[in-house]
């Protein structure tokens, strides 16, 4: 079903859903419209972000990394320091509180890297909600520690064996579940994509990243940054950072997609993506000559998705944000470099953003400033990286 233009970012977005889900989305739209304007709800979200999740996160000057590369000063927005280890908790807390206000007793979620699954399981435990998390078999194997964390938190992890057995397929199963259970269930979608109002709602809950970063860099450097860099899978950590700077025309913004091995990849905007409809939205996606969704590839599970959030599609066409890609090998190199220069183990998703910062910082003057969104920590990836580099597993 196609919704009015208010559900679009330019020509992207919309609400392409089966008739059976119309009542659920009407209810969700109405609830978000109401509570997004409710100061009491905002205060409640802010309380849990600060007292439970650990906001605000530092904006850290990576001095040794900056000097190693030469050129611009690199600051890291340390979302990796949040409870559960990634930016995903920002959105999970907001949506879980909204679900409580709506009287829901259960949440379902999809996950690739496992961080959104862990965040969903965490907020379900916090607020006394039942939780089922869908995860592809491939992702579950390479992110085994997060699977166990979800189970420890009381969630039921449902392993998906269909398709490529990655994030796309987990989303498919979550949507099927939601279609049959929305009367008492909220679908806690993890990124800024899907049918309206999810792209807007997730962006709004993640906008705290950009608001903090803007205030922090003004306090530290007394000016705005020259460049913002963030990885882009579905796009929530990137749009969360970018949202506070979109009106600042002199601030360059760069989103980094997964270039994979150079042949198989998940580069929708910078690769061979086409405009189409997937998972309830109109955006860029990877498809073959028959219109079937291509199998994607990335060393990082969280970027291994065939489409991208609709606001990113709009920003791409407007040339407001520059989109690039980083290869698996470049992300792995950046992963090691940040470990060795700063004592910080980044998520493989975030390592794609670090990889591009390494490329551009040396070409910029020492008076220039880059902010990289370090969207998550790499505990979940350590064993996967070890197995890949020891030849025990493929770059999948």
Image (cartoon, rainbow, N blue to C red):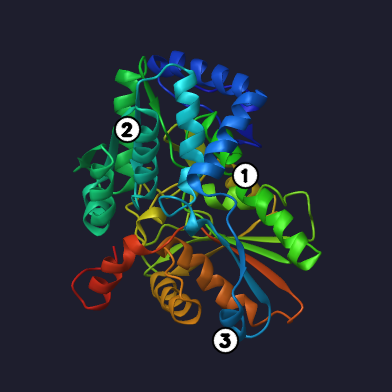
Compute the Cα span from label 2 to label 3. Answer: 44 Å
Dot 2 falls on a residue whose secondary structure is: helix
**Would residue 284 be seen by someone viewing this image from the given angle?**
no
Q: Is residue 373 left or right of residue 393?
A: right
Give percent across and percent down for residue 51: 53, 43
Which residue is under mark 1?
Answer: 207
Sooner in the amino-acid sequence: mark 2 or mark 3: 3
> Crowding at label 1, few (<14), some or many (≥20) Cα neighbours within 10 Å?
many
Q: In x, y percent, where is residue 364?
A: 70, 79
Q: Nearer the viewer, mark 2 or mark 3?
A: 3
Q: Secondary structure under badge 1?
A: loop
Q: Position of residue 169 (x, y in %)?
A: 29, 42
Q: Which residue is mark 3?
A: 68
Q: Quadrant of the C terminus?
A: bottom left
* Distance between the alpha carbons at the discs numbered 2 and 1: 25 Å
Label located before the other in sequence (2 or 1): 2
Q: Earlier in the sequence, mark 1 or mark 3?
A: 3
The residue at the point 57 percent across, 23 percent down is 32
Most foreground residue, 18 or 388: 388
Q: CA distance from mark 1 to mark 3?
A: 31 Å
| Left or right relative to 124: residue 94 | right
The reply to whether residue 256 is visible in this rendering is yes
Residue 330 lies, with reference to residue 272, above or below; the image says below
Q: Tell me what residue is drawn at x 44 percent, y 81 percent.
A: 340
Q: Secondary structure at mark 3?
A: helix
Residue located beneath label 2 in the image = 174
């Amino acid at each position: 079903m196609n919704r009015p233009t208010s559900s679009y970012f330019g020509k992207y977005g919309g609400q392409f859903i089966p008739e059976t889900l119309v009542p659920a989305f009407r209810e969700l739209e109405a609830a978000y419209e109401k509570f997004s304007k409710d100061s009491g709800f905002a205060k409640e979200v802010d309380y849990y972000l600060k007292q439970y999740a650990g906001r605000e996160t530092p904006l850290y000057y990576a001095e040794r990394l900056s000097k190693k590369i030469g050129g611009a000063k690199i600051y890291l927005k340390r979302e990796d320091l949040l409870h559960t280890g990634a930016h995903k908790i920002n959105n999970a807390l907001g949506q879980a509180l909204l679900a409580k206000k709506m009287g829901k007793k259960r949440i379902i979620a999809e996950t690739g890297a496992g961080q959104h699954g862990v965040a969903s399981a965490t907020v379900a435990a916090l607020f006394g909600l039942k939780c089922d998390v869908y995860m592809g078999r491939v992702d579950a194997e390479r992110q085994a520690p997060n699977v166990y964390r979800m189970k420890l938190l009381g969630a039921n992890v449902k392993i998906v064996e269909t398709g490529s057995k990655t994030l796309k397929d987990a989303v498919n199963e979550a949507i099927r579940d939601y279609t049959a259970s929305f009367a008492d269930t909220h679908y806690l979608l993890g990124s800024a994509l899907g049918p309206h109002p999810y792209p807007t709602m997730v962006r709004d809950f993640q906008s705290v990243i950009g608001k903090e970063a803007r205030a922090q860099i003004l306090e530290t450097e007394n000016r705005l940054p020259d460049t913002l860099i963030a990885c882009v899978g579905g796009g929530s950590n990137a749009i969360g950072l970018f949202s506070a700077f979109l009106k600042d025309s002199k601030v360059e913004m760069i989103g980094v997609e997964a270039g994979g091995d150079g042949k198989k990849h998940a580069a929708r905007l910078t690769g061979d993506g086409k405009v189409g409809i997937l998972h309830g939205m109109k955006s860029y996606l990877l498809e073959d000559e028959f219109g079937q969704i291509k199998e994607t590839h990335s060393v990082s599970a969280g970027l291994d998705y065939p489409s991208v959030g609709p606001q990113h599609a709009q920003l791409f066409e407007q040339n407001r944000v520059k989109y690039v890609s980083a290869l698996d090998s470049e992300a792995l190199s950046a992963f090691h470099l940040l470990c060795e220069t700063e004592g910080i183990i980044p998520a493989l998703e975030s390592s794609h953003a670090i990889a591009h910062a390494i490329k551009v910082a040396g070409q910029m003057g020492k008076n220039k400033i880059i902010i990289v969104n370090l969207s998550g920590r790499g505990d979940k990836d350590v064993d996967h990286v070890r197995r890949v580099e020891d030849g025990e597993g493929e770059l999948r």
